[in-house]
């Protein structure tokens, strides 16, 4: 059957067309990110509570990257990883080490030297877009991803032998071991001279505690149990949006390709997949590597976010669970589902922190819903599907708004009741979160979209029939 | 050297038996429902905290501490009972709505019995407190300790029952990941509920000691040898003290495990449990009340976890707040014990618990304390790579 | 015909599970274009033979040559790449995937995709995806499934699922096709259509077919030669009319004749 090869050769598009259709989404993402950073950010910083909004947007972006990357392992391939935060930690610490000690080596202090693209400070207006500090930061992002990917390869290897829950437990064990190792590293070095004079010492000394007569190699001093402090903040709307966009793009392209089908086939039926010629081990390891890469990049983003202390405790297995929750809520194997769930799960505890401020979230939720509806409509229109689903999308938006209003009423009422009993609603936010998680699992076990995407025809059966 | 070895061994066995007790709950639920009940370790924590509440309620706490908590012990019991009643009523209404005929009393009867027993236990403790206040010189420590253990077990049993009924049963037959997420949800719920001011609060506290404690015997050790000139030739060595509290702790754990082994392998209920674990559908066809067996398993697991919680708080009286990472890690190690032993296998869990205890304590004593978690998880990975289904676990080949 | 080299040559294949000898000394030769049946009572080891040939189980001993190349001990995906495809007795479709994706997936072994090419979407990637799509749709049309291409495979009716399994197996571009009870669960009309379909598959794709089937109507009609297994041992081999009258075969299916002439 070499005909497939010949046919593929015949059906190749022209170089121009191929390049165009391959490159425009990437360009689009970057341009949007630039616009976000240079236009929206200044606007936001003018609004009251704008900093809070932009922080939430950063958190959402990072969580979307994490959820979508985990979707490739847990959703597409059906392997079960509960050590995703460990890859994030690997990437975060690698990136942090590069940026921190790189700055110390090059500039003598770890202060941020950010161009306009990588600053979240409202009063900081550098004249240039890109500086040496940015270069260091980009290196950190990529290196964080690559080192995490290497770890993903190592962790993916047991999946050759282990299945299901057992694999999950190994990923968990890996994460815990990593946490302990990081916690045993020594304090961060604050002396530029020390860093510049740092000898490259062997791996064996990596986790030695500093003794009176001996100093740990500088690059192995990761802050120990207290966390890696003093990192410059480079993570900006631009970088978060770029990485999020590229992650979504890669996930989408993988899902729509031979790789994606192979991943999904392993999830559906490993034996049948092998019989159809899928080298299951190879794809499982690939899934781990790709997923770990993006988790690593997300970790590097996370490490350089304002208001964040990079510590191993923070990136323990509870963080992994948070990410799994996003993936499962979104629907196993749905990229858009994971992204939406990640956004919702990030926002929900913030909303519940003081539910009476829900009113302040109204405009944001409204705009987001509308944006989603419009985006879904555009995608569907481009894909040549009937335009009726606009109504479905609008209906969905209305439902979200109605639910929010309902939630708000409930909050007001419960406050009214709770007040005399001296019950602080804020204390109950995690309880409500846990309960809604359980309820969601019972009422809609397949998650938001199941394996489908938001723009899929089959997701909207009723709308389709009407059209 | 001998003393160090012996001391480590004793610690390892004491903690290992607790790991084993918790691991049993993980393993039994996994054996039957094939899912990791991540909320199990929180039941263990709940057991420890309920024991604390019980100790305060019976008046063993520091002065002034009991008034607040005792009220909420009753409140908690009341809430649980209410939750159970609500769940029952809802189920009844649902069955009615679906037209599934009249409500089946038998399934819930034994939960009712459990609730009744729990209530009696707490009532007995109240009596005890009354008698203590009447004559505070009376040393009723052991009796109240025993009662508290019993009450913690019963209450947690009830919690386990409620959890299964409310959270897990609706998801029977759902994809395993969903059940797992539900378990995580339940775990989050328990952790955060425990943190509420009205429950146990967010501050760590100290468990009053309830078990009698004195040094039973001292092994090894030597007085300092003094040379003829009065200088010290060899310094005195501290012997290993065998403390009564440790013996009682480990003894209780072992007795419970023997009881469980007997229950699983020698009784009708145990046979039913093994049958359901082997094949749920066939077991149901053979007339085994699957729902009841599953409920029973949950109750049993929760009870063992509660016992472990009590014993743990006796050995390490510093109680952390319910969401503390220490607890999570402890639960995780117990879970690792279940997996190392071969999850789904009752005797494997006991073996695994001991093994994990030994590895952890000997590693900590002879290698480095800093990496004690690494030894545990390292052992886990090693065992799984060599025997993918644990030491005593068996693999079932998929039929093509 | 006899001058053709054998496509699939199996000699002395053995497999036991614990003490149970599931397949003993199984031998078989398929030449290009053969359509051979493999029958036997329940538990005779037919599916085990398929599992051994496709690498799901590892044979204890014996020789299996596909186009002169040994396939014994290879992982299933390598055997699929070497040109052997199969269907499953208990349907094993990728339920949550669309019908189209089920077939597209099976084109997998004949593609030359790379991770970088997929992420960057090179020219070759586009060409190949288009080629796969075209080929999958072609196959679906042939199997009368084209109008259901976007449905989830698990929502198809039973008969369609069986046909989809064959379509999927063909998409791997096999030289030998192993069909495990393709007619199971089909109604009479569907069975008649299935016979036609199998004949057409053989002529249009030039594949060699080995067929396990319990429905004697189907087997006797379409197979040129039949091998009969009982308790893991071949008890008869030959053309259908010969098999139908073979006393050993009758005994295997109906039991030993008792002296009274009844059936034990």
Image (tube, coloured by chain):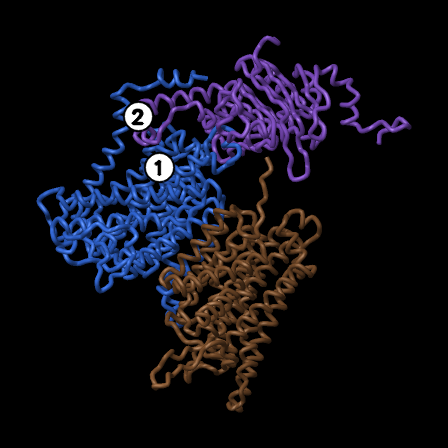
Chain colours: A blue, B brown, C purple
Say which element carries label 2: loop
- Place of residue A246 in the rendered image (x, y in percent of width and height, measured from the top left): 28, 38
Left or right of residue C67: residue A151: left
| Count of marks placed on residues | 2
Residue sitting at 71 percent across and 22 percent down? C216
Say which element carries label 1: helix
Report the chain holding disc 2: C
In-front residue for pair C206/A427: C206
- Place of residue A257 in the rendered image (x, y in percent of width and height, measured from the top left): 39, 30
Query: Which quadrant: the C terminus of chain A?
Result: top left
Q: Residues within 10 Å of mark 2 (few under 14, many from 20)?
A: many
Residue A251 image label:
1
* The residue positioned farthest toward the front in the image shown: B228
- Place of residue B279 in the rendered image (x, y in percent of width and height, measured from the top left): 63, 48
Left or right of residue A403: residue A60: left
In-front residue for pair A442/B61: B61
In-front residue for pair B331/B128: B331
Residue occupied by mark 2: C122
**Camera-side mark, 1 or 2:** 2
Report the chain holding disc 1: A
Choose top left, top right, bottom left or bottom right for residue C225. Answer: top right
- Place of residue C5 in the rendered image (x, y in percent of width and height, measured from the top left): 56, 12
Q: Is residue A397 among what the camera can see?
A: no
Q: Is residue A126 above or below residue B361?
A: above
Q: CA distance from mark 1 to mark 2?
A: 16 Å
Do the residues under discs 1 and 2 have CB atoms within 8 angstroms? no
In the rendered image, residues at marks 1 and 2 fall on the same chain: no
Q: Is residue A121 among what the camera can see?
A: yes
In-front residue for pair C127/B216: B216
Q: Residues within 10 Å of mark 1 (few under 14, many from 20)?
A: many
* The residue positioned farthest toward the left in the image shown: A127
Choose top left, top right, bottom left or bottom right for residue B318. Answer: bottom left
């Amino acid at each position: 059957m070499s005909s497939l090869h010949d046919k593929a050769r015949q059906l190749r598009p022209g170089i121009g067309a191929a390049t165009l259709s391959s490159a425009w989404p990437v360009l689009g993402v970057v341009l949007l990110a630039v616009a976000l950073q240079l236009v929206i950010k200044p606007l936001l910083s003018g609004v009251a509570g704008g900093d809070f909004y932009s922080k939430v947007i950063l958190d959402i972006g990072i969580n979307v990257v994490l959820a979508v990357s985990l979707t490739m392992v847990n959703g597409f391939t059906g392997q079960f990883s509960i050590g995703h935060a460990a890859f994030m930690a690997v990437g975060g610490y690698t990136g942090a080490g590069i940026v921190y000690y790189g700055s110390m080596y090059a500039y003598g202090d770890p202060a941020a030297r950010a161009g306009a693209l990588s600053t979240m400070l409202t009063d900081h207006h550098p004249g240039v877009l890109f500086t040496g500090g940015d270069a260091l930061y980009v290196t950190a992002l990529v290196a964080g991803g690559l080192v995490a990917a290497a770890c993903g390869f190592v962790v993916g290897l047991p999946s050759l032998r282990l299945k299901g829950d057992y694999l999950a437990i190994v990923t968990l064990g890996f994460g815990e071991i990593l946490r302990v190792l990081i916690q045993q590293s020594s304090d961060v070095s604050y002396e530029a001279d020390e860093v510049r004079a740092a000898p490259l010492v062997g791996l064996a000394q990596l986790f030695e505690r500093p003794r009176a007569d001996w100093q740990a190699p500088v690059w192995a001093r990761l802050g120990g149990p207290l966390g890696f402090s003093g990192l410059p903040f480079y993570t900006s709307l631009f970088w978060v949006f770029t990485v999020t966009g590229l992650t979504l793009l890669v996930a989408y392209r993988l899902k729509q390709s031979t790789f994606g089908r192979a991943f999904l086939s392993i999830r559906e039926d490993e034996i049948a997949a092998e019989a159809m010629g899928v080298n299951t081990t190879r794809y499982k390891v690939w899934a781990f590597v790709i997923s770990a890469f993006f988790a690593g990049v997300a970790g590097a983003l996370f490490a350089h976010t304002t208001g964040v202390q990079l510590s191993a405790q923070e990136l323990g297995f509870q963080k992994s669970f948070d990410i799994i929750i996003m993936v499962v809520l979104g629907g196993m194997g749905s990229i858009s589902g994971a992204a939406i769930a990640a956004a919702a799960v990030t926002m929900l505890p913030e909303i519940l922190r003081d539910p009476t401020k829900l009113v302040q979230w109204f405009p944001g939720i409204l705009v987001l819903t509308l944006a989603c509806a419009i985006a879904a409509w555009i995608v569907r229109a481009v894909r040549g599907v009937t335009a009726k689903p606009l109504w479905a999308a609008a209906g969905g938006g209305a439902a979200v708004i109605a639910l929010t209003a309902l939630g708000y009423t409930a909050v007001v009422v419960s406050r009214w009741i709770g007040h005399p009993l001296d019950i602080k609603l804020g204390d109950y936010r995690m309880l409500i979160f846990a309960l809604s998680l359980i309820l969601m699992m019972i009422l809609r076990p397949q998650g938001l979209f199941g394996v489908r995407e938001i723009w899929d025809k089959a997701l909207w059966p009723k709308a389709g029939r009407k059209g | 050297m001998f003393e160090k070895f012996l001391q480590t061994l004793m610690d390892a066995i004491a903690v290992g038996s607790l790991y084993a007790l918790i691991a049993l709950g993980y393993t039994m639920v996994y054996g039957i429902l094939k899912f990791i009940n991540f909320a199990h370790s929180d039941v263990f924590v709940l057991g420890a905290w309920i024991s604390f509440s019980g100790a305060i309620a019976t008046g063993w706490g520091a002065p002034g501490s009991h008034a607040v908590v005792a009220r909420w012990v009753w409140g908690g019991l009341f809430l649980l009972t209410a939750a159970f009643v609500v769940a029952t009523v809802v189920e009844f209404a649902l069955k009615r709505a679906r037209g599934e005929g009249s409500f089946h009393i038998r399934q819930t009867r034994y939960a009712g019995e459990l609730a009744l027993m729990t209530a009696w236990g707490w009532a007995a403790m109240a009596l005890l407190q009354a008698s203590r206040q009447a004559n505070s010189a009376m040393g009723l420590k052991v009796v109240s300790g025993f009662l508290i253990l019993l009450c913690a077990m019963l209450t947690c049993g009830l919690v386990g029952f409620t959890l299964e009924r409310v959270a897990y049963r609706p998801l029977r037959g759902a994809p395993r990941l969903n059940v797992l997420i539900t378990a995580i949800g339940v775990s989050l719920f328990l952790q955060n509920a425990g943190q509420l001011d009205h429950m146990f609060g967010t501050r760590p506290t100290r468990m009053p000691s309830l078990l009698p404690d004195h040094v039973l015997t001292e092994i090894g050790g030597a007085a300092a040898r003094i040379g003829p000139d009065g200088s010290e030739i060899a310094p005195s060595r501290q012997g290993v003290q065998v403390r009564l509290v440790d013996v009682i702790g480990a003894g209780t754990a072992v007795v419970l495990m023997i009881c469980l082994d007997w229950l699983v392998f020698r009784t009708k209920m145990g046979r039913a449990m093994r049958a359901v674990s082997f094949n749920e559908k066939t077991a149901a066809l053979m007339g085994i009340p699957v729902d009841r067996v599953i409920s029973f398993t949950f109750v049993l697991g929760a009870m063992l976890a509660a016992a472990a919680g009590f014993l743990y708080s006796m050995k390490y009286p510093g109680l952390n707040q319910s969401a503390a990472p220490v607890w999570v890690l402890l639960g995780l190690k117990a879970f690792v014990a279940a997996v190392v032993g071969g999850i789904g296998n009752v005797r494997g869990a006991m073996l695994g618990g001991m093994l994990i205890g030994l590895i952890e304590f000997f590693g900590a004593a002879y290698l480095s304390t800093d990496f004690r978690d690494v030894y545990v998880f390292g052992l886990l990975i090693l065992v799984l790579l060599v025997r993918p289904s644990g030491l005593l676990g068996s693999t079932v080949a998929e039929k093509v | 015909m006899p001058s053709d080299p054998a496509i699939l040559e199996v000699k002395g294949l053995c497999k036991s599970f614990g003490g149970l000898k599931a397949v003993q000394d199984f031998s078989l030769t398929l030449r290009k274009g053969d359509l051979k049946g493999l029958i036997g009572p329940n538990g005779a080891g037919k599916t085990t033979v398929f599992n051994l040939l496709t690498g799901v189980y590892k044979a204890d001993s014996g020789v299996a040559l596909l186009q002169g190349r040994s396939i014994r001990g290879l992982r299933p995906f390598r055997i699929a790449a070497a040109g052997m495809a199969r269907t499953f007795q208990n349907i094993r479709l990728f339920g949550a995937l669309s019908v189209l994706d089920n077939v597209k997936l099976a084109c997998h072994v004949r593609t030359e995709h790379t991770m970088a090419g997929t992420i960057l979407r090179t020219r070759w990637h586009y060409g190949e995806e288009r080629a796969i799509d075209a080929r999958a749709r072609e196959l679906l049309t042939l199997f009368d499934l084209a109008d259901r291409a976007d449905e989830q495979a698990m929502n198809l009716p039973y008969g369609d699922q069986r046909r989809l399994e064959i379509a999927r197996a063909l998409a791997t571009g096999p030289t030998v096709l192993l069909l495990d009870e393709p007619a199971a669960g089909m109604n009479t009309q569907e069975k008649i259509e299935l016979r036609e379909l199998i004949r057409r598959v053989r002529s249009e794709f030039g594949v060699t077919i080995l067929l396990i089937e319990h429905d004697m109507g189907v087997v006797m009609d379409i197979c040129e030669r039949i091998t009969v297994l009982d308790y893991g041992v071949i008890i008869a081999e030959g053309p259908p009319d010969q098999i139908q009258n073979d006393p050993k075969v009758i005994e295997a299916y109906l039991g030993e004749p008792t002296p009274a002439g009844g059936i034990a």
